Image (spheres, helix red, strand yellow):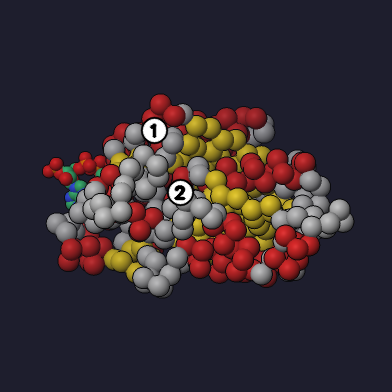
């Protein structure tokens, strides 16, 4: 199978500050036992006061650039998947460009017919952001041969968690991930195919406030609509269905059986969801990689955190067939096939 998109470098970053289940026991009526049994999560990393998502996004980007052994001047696009951006505007993508010092190589002062201008923007597909980003990158690579895309996932959901809501606040953590995507050159993994979907009828199942719906005046108090809210049980059901069905669709389209899959990495939301999807797909337990116990649900970044660790452990291998799948607010979902 030929590809139009290759992962040339990969990097991730998590903040140093951690919040364990035992830390939650001190601030709300919950227990390590309840959280581990219902979710599989033991720990999460959260932004420190002086940190923001562009800081961890920049760190992940630098690692991906170094891993790909490219120079930053080769980057033509910075695409950032986030549902917890630093500001409504400017985009996290522009903040990363500034931190990387891209202005001198592809900014306003360098516009010329010979020099490609840098493209930067954020997009929101919530926890499905990485899979959506792979599809976006494939589209850009078809339009612009020789493009070098820095695809970043940057999430700081701890800043939008209601720590009085024990059902949602225990689930999420902060993290960033980055990959360099190209249609040429040395690579780690090839992106064979991607399939994504969405259904706005389920818009109310997971919501994060702070946009224009929130009609605040200076001096107003923040109320709970500002924070993340979720109908957990409903989300659980749809997540299992969405990830299973989209994965079967992708396999069928590529004439593959589940037995052809060497490794399965699902969005690291909840161990029970991952197990349910794995069972429905019929994938061997040994071929399912998870690391959510350390990080919680890091939204768009969770698959990259898992890929990075699986690579380090020698489990994610070039040439082996890896199935990725994700699900998130919107509702959105998607699956991707790597080799
Ligand atoms: N600690 C202790 N008890 C808790 C608790 C916590 N952190 N959170 C909720 N509970 C309680 C509830 O108050 C409820 O008590 P009650 O029966 O006395 O009313 C009981 O546990 C069951 O609550 P419920 O919300 O029905 O639990 P659940 O089994 O559905 O588990 C989730 C809750 C959130 C773990 C589960 O619904 C889930 O994983 N959903 C998917 C969430 C997700 O992954 N979303 C992201 C997708 S991208």
* Residue at left offset 37%, top offset 65%: 46
Asked whether the viewer can see residue 17, the reply is yes
> Residue at label 1?
203
Asked if 195 appears above or below 310 in the picture, the reply is: above
Q: Position of residue 36 (x, y in %)?
A: 27, 56
* Residue at left offset 53%, top offset 32%: 197
**Foreground of the two, 292 or 74:** 74
> Residue at label 2?
83
Q: Which comes before the other along the chain, label 1 or label 2?
A: 2
* Residue 85 falls left or right of residue 148: left
C-alpha span from label 1 to label 2: 14 Å
Look at the numbered disc 1 and say if its residue's Cβ is closer than 8 Å to ligand 1: no
Q: Position of residue 307 (x, y in %)?
A: 55, 57
Asked if 128 appears above or below 158 in the picture, the reply is: above
Q: Position of residue 90 (x, y in %)?
A: 54, 55
Quarter of the rendering occupied by the N terminus: top right
């Amino acid at each position: 199978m030929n590809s139009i998109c290759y992962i040339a470098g990969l990097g991730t970053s998590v903040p140093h500050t951690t919040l364990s289940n035992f830390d939650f026991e001190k601030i709300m009526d919950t227990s390590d036992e309840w959280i581990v049994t219902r979710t599989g999560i033991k720990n999460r990393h959260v932004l420190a006061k002086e940190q923001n998502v562009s800081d961890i996004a920049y760190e992940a980007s630098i690692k991906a650039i170094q891993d790909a052994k490219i120079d930053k001047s080769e980057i033509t696009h910075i695409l950032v998947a986030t549902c917890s951006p630093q500001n409504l505007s400017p985009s996290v993508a522009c903040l990363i460009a500034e931190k990387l010092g891209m202005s001198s190589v592809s900014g306003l002062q360098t516009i010329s017919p010979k020099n490609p201008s840098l493209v930067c923007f954020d997009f929101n597909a919530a926890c499905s952001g990485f899979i959506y980003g792979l599809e976006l990158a494939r589209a850009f690579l078809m339009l612009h041969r020789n493009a070098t895309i820095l695809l970043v996932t940057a999430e700081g959901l701890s800043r939008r968690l209601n720590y009085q809501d024990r059902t949602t606040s225990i689930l999420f953590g902060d993290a960033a991930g980055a990959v360099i995507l190209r249609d040429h050159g040395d690579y780690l993994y090839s992106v064979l195919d991607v399939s994504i979907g969405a259904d706005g009828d389920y818009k109310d199942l997971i919501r994060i406030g702070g946009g224009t719906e929130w009609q605040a005046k200076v001096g107003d108090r923040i109320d709970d609509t500002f924070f993340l809210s979720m109908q957990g049980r409903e989300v659980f059901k749809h997540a299992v269905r969405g990830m299973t069905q989209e994965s079967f669709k992708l396999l069928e389209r590529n004439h593959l059986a589940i037995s052809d899959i060497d490794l399965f990495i699902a969005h690291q939301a909840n161990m029970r969801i991952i197990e349910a999807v794995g069972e429905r797909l019929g994938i061997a337990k040994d071929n399912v990689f998870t690391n959510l116990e350390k990080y919680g649900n890091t939204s768009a970044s969770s698959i990259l955190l898992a890929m990075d660790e699986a690579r380090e452990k020698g489990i994610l291998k070039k040439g082996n067939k890896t199935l990725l799948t994700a699900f998130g607010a919107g509702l959105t979902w998607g699956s991707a096939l790597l080799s």
